[in-house]
Image: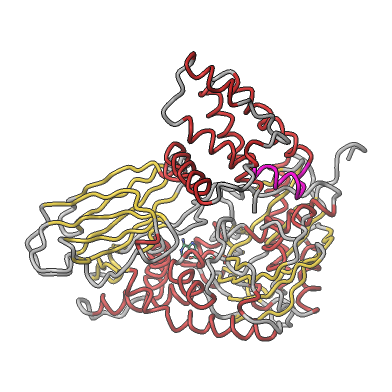
Amino acid sequence: MSQNVPPLVIGIDLGTTNSVVAVAQDGTLTVIPVNGQSSMPSAVGIDPTGKLVVGQAAKNQAISAPENTVLSIKRIMGTDATAELGGKSYRPEEISALILGELKRAAEEHLGRPVTQAVITVPAFFNERQRLATQDAGSLAGLEVLRIINEPTAAALAYGAGQADTAEDETLLVYDLGGGTFDVSVVRVENGIVEVRASHGDIHLGGDDFDEALTALGEERLREKHADALPAAAQRRLKSAMELAKIRLSDEPFATIREEYLTPSGHLETEISRHDYEQLIEPWLVKTLDCVQRTISDAGITAHEIDKIMLVGGVTRTPIVQELLLRTLGMEPRHEINPDLVVAMGAAIQGATLAGQPAPAILVDISAHTYSVLAVVGGDFMGDLLGCCPVVRRGTPLPVTKADLFTTGVDSQKKVAVKVFQGESDDPSQNLSIGEFMVTGLSKVPAGNEIIVQFHIDLNGLLTATATEKRTGLAKSVTIDTAGQHRINLDAARTNLAALFEEQDAAFPDEDDDFQDADIIPWPSGETTAASASEVEAPANSAALLASAKSLRNRAGKLLEQGVAEADAAAIRASLAAVPVAIDARDWDQLCTTLDTLSDLLFYLED
Ligand code: AMP
């Protein structure tokens, strides 16, 4: 390699179900596609022609040729157990090396240069032998493993922990629920050092269990109509369909499964609701929450001392998982970085640091608020709904489409009013009402008529809310500009403030009016103002504008006294200096613009 090619260290999340490779280069982080996908199944197989296949091709044949396919090798890493493949035995290091080799190949193809160094992640509970086995697998794949780091540490790094500009000490809880394993860790960031304080888990708990439970439910429903036993291959096909249904249920209240010829005469067409699915998986989720409590207590802290919860693993997209954590720990989990990719991203960040490159910050567009629905009819709540029901939660990456199920509360209910709220409370009076619409002409059926409410929010913050009567498809929607909702009505606010100042002046007539002090704003004299008032007509809200200027000037003065970065101080001073110039010139539009700029500056700089 030529002397001036900078060193490149890839980051690898070598997962039980899926593996991911990423790289940070010139301050940009890239998840490297493997055969067009951001993650690759951790599967190795020998195909019917005797060819070695790794990744998706191997996973595909796991259904038809399980004896020639190895899955979940990570479960036996660092043990003497072996895996059988095409009639031969292989050590877990060897199988893992094939997976790592495929990731290395994809990275080299993507980057157009050889890759020889890597950071690989392992679960925090991996012992020394398991870590060494992972390192050996890397060597076998032709990779110098510069560092083995813990998966929760990598997740914390991806969320910016330990970076020079976020020098805060904090305690993080990383909840990782993947396809095959679950683990939870308390991570402490102190003086820029990220350290796992306690970790627990279950290497046999994950999305696979949920797929199996759904498969059993599907079989049960099939048996109601067709008595034949399900052949093994059909069972695996059903499991695959159920995994897709599980994924759909994270965004939709129902999933329909259609599988033909599971048995010679047995077709399955069934629907599973999110509610039924949540009940099905509840025992496993309760187990994970017990683990969370144990880990917190082992770390010697209380739940109140946790600053952030981070989600890792595809299954954490399941809404009930996030809700249970919120309910148990009283804090909204962070999920803005793709939970399937966050660990590899952290490994790549560590790799960049080791290669002497700047660590990139990961930027994602997220929903700044929770958007919920309160659906009412004639003053009655729909069903037993008593408050705002979140459909899209704060911190969700955009664009997003999510739907939830509501039901009518009375028999033969002809219409529902769907009210959309922005805010974090379940009490509508604490949130901002941002829109509402009516769906009329509903079917004449008993209470419990199902209405699906779907929110789609695009990258510009446009929220489209759609309500659909499930049985007929009757639908109505509205689009709301949520970005517009964040802005305060400046004129109203200025009038409000002016009233407040007038009240203050009336109540404390003898107080010094520091508004007139010209230490920061050289204020124009009253005479000039009066004289010019006849020349240039002042707008109706001029008093409010002046009051607003006074208030902003006081706030700016306080900030400058407290001390802010030089660039910010300069920006504040420039705005302050522009205020009297605009007043002198009777340029009310310019005054408005200047006050807006100043107000925005202060908003971002004040705590
Ligand atoms: P991981 O081991 O982190 O790659 O997670 C893989 C698991 O996440 C598999 O069981 C997937 O079926 C599951 N998964 C992926 N996406 C979703 C989703 N949107 N909702 C629920 N589970 C998901």
136 vs 293: above or below: above
Identify which residue, 425 or 182, lies in the foreground.
Answer: 425
Q: Quadrant of the C terminus?
A: bottom right
Q: x, y percentage for residue 513?
A: 62, 42
Q: Quadrant of the N terminus?
A: top right
Q: x, y percentage for residue 408?
A: 18, 65
Would residue 4 be found to the left or right of residue 578 on screen? right
* Residue projecting furthest to the front: 510
Q: x, y percentage for residue 64?
A: 46, 66
| Residue at x-position 29% and y-position 56% | 453
Q: x, y percentage for residue 91?
A: 72, 74
* Residue projecting furthest to the top: 535
Counting the numbered discs, the total is: 0
Would residue 218 be found to the left or right of residue 378 on screen? right
Magenta range = 554-565
260 vs 363: above or below: below
Looking at the magenta stretch, what is its main secondary structure? helix
Q: How is the image coloured?
A: secondary structure
| Residue at x-position 56% and y-position 56% | 336
**Magenta span contains residue 151:** no
Identify which residue, 155 or 597, lies in the foreground.
Answer: 597
Q: Quadrant of residue 58?
A: bottom right
| Residue at x-position 60% and y-position 68% | 309
Would residue 431 be found to the left or right of residue 558 on screen? left
Q: Quadrant of residue 83?
A: bottom right
511 vs 289: above or below: above
Identify which residue, 334 or 417, lies in the foreground.
Answer: 417
